[in-house]
Image (cartoon, rainbow, N blue to C red):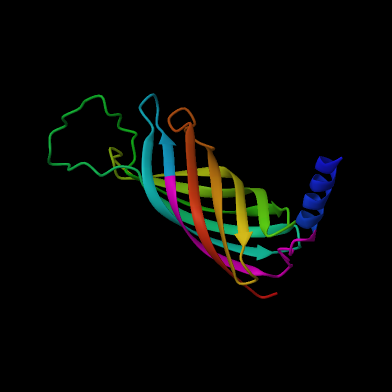
Amino acid sequence: MRVLRIATASLALLLVAAPASAVERQHHLALAPSLGLLKVDQSPLSVGAGINALYTYGITDQFNLVVEGGSSLLSFSRDPQEPEKDKTVPKTRPGNLSTLGTGLTYVLDVLRFVPYGGVLLGGNVLGGGTLENPRFIPSIQLALGLDYQFNRLVSAGVGYRQHIFFAEPSTYPSYSVIFAKIELSWGY
């Protein structure tokens, strides 16, 4: 019986916690250092650091319009004057990958922790590395994240984006981005 009382009291405290108070017409601007993971052909995973910028506009309490852009440095470009030392490196491995996307996210505004998920449409530019020319590939992004609102002005969070390329899926089967962000909000 004591365990039941403790569990009930804990649940009551959780439900009484201060709400995150996401509201419609609220703007959010965030910068996010990121980690990009690109799978190319049958070769090892390309991993690199990057930076993302995110803008969010609250259409309603539950739905947000999202515009995101970012770039990851996946490998250093090769010097074209240097003879190839390794013939096994495919001619499809980019040195950097930049993205831009827009879409909708669904927000579960329950407490100060605010989970969200959504879908974005966008494009990707792959360049450098062993590519002879930059490549543009349209994609869809599946978005997941969790934010913590310190107050109405500042929040921090983590996010995950899985890019699904519409073209060349056998060459570039997977591109994922993991990031941590600091976000400023206004307009409530």
Name the residue furthest front: 2
Instruction: Pinpoint residue 1: horizontal percent, then vertical percent.
Output: 87, 40
Instruction: Pinpoint residue 101: horizontal percent, then vertical percent.
Output: 55, 53
Q: Is residue 55 visible?
A: yes
Query: How many marks are shown on the rendered structure?
Result: 0
Q: In the image, is residue 97 above or below residue 52?
A: above
Q: Is residue 23 magenta?
A: yes
Front residue of 169 and 144: 144
> Residue at 47% of width from left, 38% of height from top?
175
**Residue 22's quadrant in the figure?**
bottom right
Q: In the image, is residue 156 above or below residue 8?
A: below
Q: Is residue 124 left or right of residue 59?
A: left
Front residue of 173 and 159: 159
Q: In the image, is residue 44 above or below residue 164?
A: above
Q: Is residue 147 left or right of residue 130?
A: right
Instruction: Pinpoint residue 158: horizontal percent, then vertical percent.
Output: 55, 51
Front residue of 71 and 4: 4
Q: Is residue 99 left or right of residue 5?
A: left
Instruction: Pinpoint residue 162: horizontal percent, then vertical percent.
Output: 54, 41
Front residue of 150 and 86: 150
> Residue at 80% of width from left, 45% of height from top?
7
Quadrant occupied by the C terminus: bottom right
Q: Is residue 134 visible?
A: no
Name the residue furthest right: 1
Q: Which residues are magenta?
A: 16-35
Name the residue furthest bottom: 187
Q: Is residue 112 left or right of residue 49?
A: right
Q: Is residue 21 magenta?
A: yes
> Residue at 50% of width from left, 54% of height from top?
180
Q: In the image, is residue 40 above or below residue 109?
A: above
